[in-house]
Amino acid sequence: MQEPFRAAASHEAKGGGEIAVTVRNVGMDFDGVQAVKNASFDLPKGRFLTILGPSGSGKTTLLRMIAGFQTPSSGEIFINGEAVSAVPPHKRSIGMVFQRLALFPHMTAAENVAFPLKMRRRDARTIPDRVERYLALVRLGGYGGRRIHELSGGQQQRVAIARALVFEPDLLLLDEPLAALDRKLREEMQLEFRRIQRELGVTTINVTHDQREALVVSDDIVVMDQGEIQQKARPIHTYRQPRNAFVANFIGVTNFIAGTVRAVSEAGDVSILRGDLMLAGKIGDPVNPPAEGDKASGAIRAEQIRLAGDAAQLSKLDCMLAGTVTDTIFEGERMVYEVACAAIGDEVIRVFDHDPAAHTQFDIGESVFLGWNARDMLVFR
Amino acid sequence: MRAARTAYPLTWRIMDALEGVAAAIWPARFRRATPYLMLLPAVLLVGLLVLGLIQIADASLRTLDTTTFQFSDDYSTANFRRALTEPLFLVVAQRSLVAALIVTAVTLVFAFPYAYLMVRTRSPGLRKFLLIALFLPFFIGQVVRAYGWLIILGNQGMVNEALGLVGVAPMRLIYNYPAVLFGLVQYMLPFAVLMLAPALTAIPEELEAAAGSLGANWVRTFIHVVLPLARPGFIGAGVVVLTLSLTDFAVPAILGGGSHDFIANAIYDQFFRTSDQGLGAMLALMLVALGSILVGLVFALFGAGTLAMGRSRV
Ligand SMILES: Nc1ncnc2c1ncn2[C@@H]1O[C@H](COP(=O)(O)OP(=O)(O)OP(=O)(O)O)[C@@H](O)[C@H]1O
Ligand SMILES: [Mg+2]
């Protein structure tokens, strides 16, 4: 497997730190609808970037502009340092896997994979070998003669990936190609993407609205909402240090407790007051910190809250709330409790309990205590 | 009890009653015959046509006695030999065939961009305009349209008048072969567009974008992706235009002015001018044969699944 891809590997080595794609102040207007607003980011060579956001947030539009199917209304996109707004798609070195795959139904799997090589007038004698090699890369060795409709969904997916990679593009774009697959296959293909991307070292931009996929496959995640980039960070930072309430809410299960800021310290500690309850937390967004008297909300993840039958068990934690279990939801690998807390006006707080032995610990209607550490609560304006 | 009755809507009860009646006159064990029963009207109509064809075949083998104007009682191949040997018929046949082929090719070339634009345009207004422009000629009818061309292209027609204004002597724009071809193409275009459009609609736009990102410019995208996938549409439109042109009557009659007859005009002459129904019938049969051979040839060359019949390959 190693030998045939030497070229690609050296390509990666050469690319250390170089910027493959720059998106600078890019905007897209569809007669009145601003699908993308002032988006900017850099993507170093060889990295795997995921654009994550809810439906309609402008992910596909941004991707299509990078691919060259749409021209930005404002701003500029650079690929390998060159502005590309005047370069048509077929002259950009970009492999794209489409949401609905867009395989050619009148060709076999091998003919599909050979298509970009033929269109780029590569030496005809080398084409069959190369096609076979890339089919093997996506674990479809020997399937080349099959017509597209004779392949399963996952196999078609892999043909599309092979077709996008076979001509060794500078950039691989993936537009939610896994969205239509069942969960098991999707998770398998996510790991497959990761393996192939690492093996070839090709710079990749992936679009998805599946947060798990983004966390699993990416080097970096760009979170988008309503056409605006909310945060660009490594997966672990996106999850642990969300920059605003949207990101905190979109990824993971997060509880928000609204209140008024009472004190802000140099070290980044914030206290917010909700009714008679004082909650301690940390500043979520240092660029846009809350000030005393502001309305703000404290965000706390469901898995960072401990649940106990009596208060003494939670004495080591900084914050504590009393409440009543209103619902229990069994999700297989975990139990989700919904707890209504009187101190915050009977708002419902969601808590995970990962301990399998504890599944039947609390019933609906039971009185419980919730506890967490102040450093886990992020306060956003 | 009463509540249950009102909850069961009247329309449902009517449907139940109808189904009951249907079951009484057409019991379940006859069900398998239902599809064949539905085929019956079509079979009957085609059957009538076949009867007519037998009648024509019978007539085609009888020769006309020009002194008595009676048809012979016994069969002979005299009409067949006349049709093949008389130079006039060969000229007419050749003219029709060549015209049909040219018209088919030109029409398909013209129809494709029209159909493509109609299917792919993002502007609903433009799509509606193109559709209406397509159907308008159907409302006008072939004969009126051909006369329209006479008015526009005739010796004192609008084109010649306009040319006269800039000092060009009047030209003979009608009663020649190109005029007939022109009229036919104009007549066939809507048919071809209507048959191409569904084939193009069936091609996902994303395939063309994909071809682009894989390195194909629009010419190669057209050749390698659009054309092969639109093939059923092209074959269907081609067969329709070919057969309609080959058998056309009005356009050569009006725009050809009698000097550029097609086979159908020759048949008409035999039936209604010389009253030699035997020869007319023979010519008609030969036209049917010629058309069938052409269509058969197309299917043999491009495969029977080309009319998007049978199972879809997509
Ligand atoms: N061609 C277009 N014309 C007009 N509006 C468009 C067009 N394409 C996208 N939009 C609008 O731009 C916004 C962003 O669309 P986009 O397709 O980029 O969303 P997305 O993030 O890819 O969503 P999804 O996850 O559902 O695919 C949407 O509000 C959409 O309606
Ligand atoms: Mg999308």
Image (tube, coloured by chain):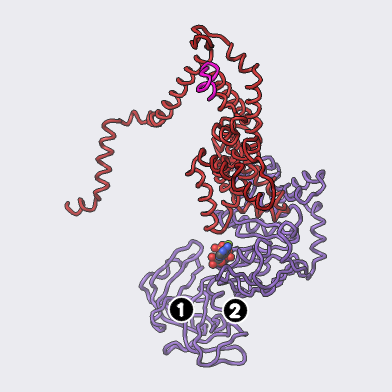
Chain colours: A purple, B red
A335 sits left or right of A133 in the view: left
Residue interval drawn in magenta: B268-280
Question: x, y (%) of residue B295?
Answer: 60, 29
At x 56% / y 35%, what residue is drawn? B254
At x 55% / y 88%, what residue is drawn? A290
User: Which of the two marks, 2 or 1, is nearer to us in this view?
Assistant: 2
Question: x, y (%) of residue B285?
Answer: 55, 21
Which amino acid type is marked by label 1? Leu
Tell me, yes or no, if residue B210 can be seen here: yes
At x 24% / y 49%, what residue is drawn? B10
Secondary structure, mark 1, is strand
Magenta stretch contains residue A138: no
Question: x, y (%) of residue B85?
Answer: 65, 16
| Residues tagged 2 and 1 counted as in contact (Cβ below 8 A) | no
Whichever of callouts 2 and 1 sits on the residue coming sooner in the sequence is: 2
Residue where numbered disc 1 is placed: A370
- Indicate the quadrant where residue A201 lies: bottom right
Of A48 and B113, nearer the camera is B113
Separation of marks 2 and 1 at Cα, in angstroms: 25 Å
Of A8 and B194, nearer the camera is B194
Tell me, yes or no, if residue A197 can be seen here: no
Residue where numbered disc 2 is placed: A243
Secondary structure, mark 2, is loop
